[in-house]
Amino acid sequence: MFLRPSASCLLFSTVTVVGLLALAGCRSHQYAHVLKDHQQDMVGSHEAGAETFNSLVDESVSKLLSRQAPEGTVEELSGEPLSKRICFVGVENYSSEDIGDFKDQLFEQIDASVATSGQFQTISTRYVENGLRQLRLVPGDLMVPQNMRSFSSVMEQNGQPFDYLLFAKLTSGTTESNKSYQRDYLLTLELVDLNTGRSDKESAKVRKGYHSSRVGSWMKYSSPLAR
């Protein structure tokens, strides 16, 4: 039995409308769940995410502080060790990606990791931002001796003297292979001793592969041809 053309058109239109409504309904809903501590971070499909940045911060901070002398200066009255003070001036993003709200989170993660190490004290971000704003400087300007002296003076006037400057810089490098590409993310921490002028650097790297399909990923790393 064949449907008349008018009935066929009506049936096709009805199915099309139902399908579009179903798609619209799917798009209007979003679901979420809270990750437990033992669960892995989600892996970003198009750019770096928590799985990249958390690893970079943990490794770079740990490696940098492990090389610093654990003892601080000694307070004359109490005789107890006094942790040296670090002025962390921010995270510079020189990678190929716009890291968005991760920039502030990276700053807070690094600052908290240094503060809880027990080796150093960190200065409140608000004091640092106000000092830079007062002098109309950006973090990179502090490597000019005159700017450094002015900034140190302002911080001392605000009751926030410091012994070290800490810089954080995020960079990336991309290697393309047909429709797949690898991106290497490098987070570099630089600690500058104001008393000696000595600079100490430490970096952490995460390599990440991006593919247009799961087959592409399998062909690159899991197939017998890739071995």
Image: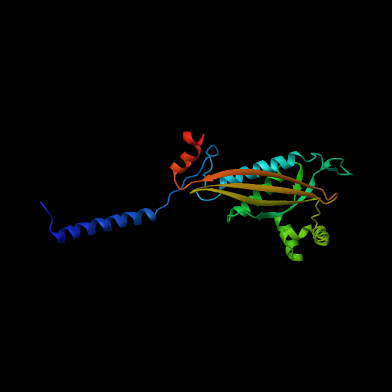
Q: Is residue 116 above or below residue 24?
A: above
Please, is residue 120 above or below residue 160 in the view?
above
On the question of residue 100 being in view, the answer is: no
Question: Foreground residue, 120 or 78?
Answer: 120
Percent from the top left, x then y, of residue 126?
Answer: 71, 58
Q: Position of residue 222 (x, y in %)?
A: 48, 36
Camera-side residue of 93 and 225: 225
Residue 102 is left or right of residue 132, and the answer is left
* Colour mapping used in the image: rainbow
Above or below 137: residue 101: above
Q: Which image quarter: residue 148?
A: bottom right
Say which residue appears at 60% left-offset and 46% top-offset. 184
Residue 137 percent across, percent down from the top left: 74, 63
| Extreme-left residue of the structure | 1
Q: Position of residue 101 (x, y in %)?
A: 58, 55
**Residue at point 84% right, 40% down?**
80
| Residue 85 seen by the camera | yes
User: In the picture shown, does residue 33 fall above or below 20?
Assistant: above
Residue drawn where x is 81% and y is 39% of the image: 71
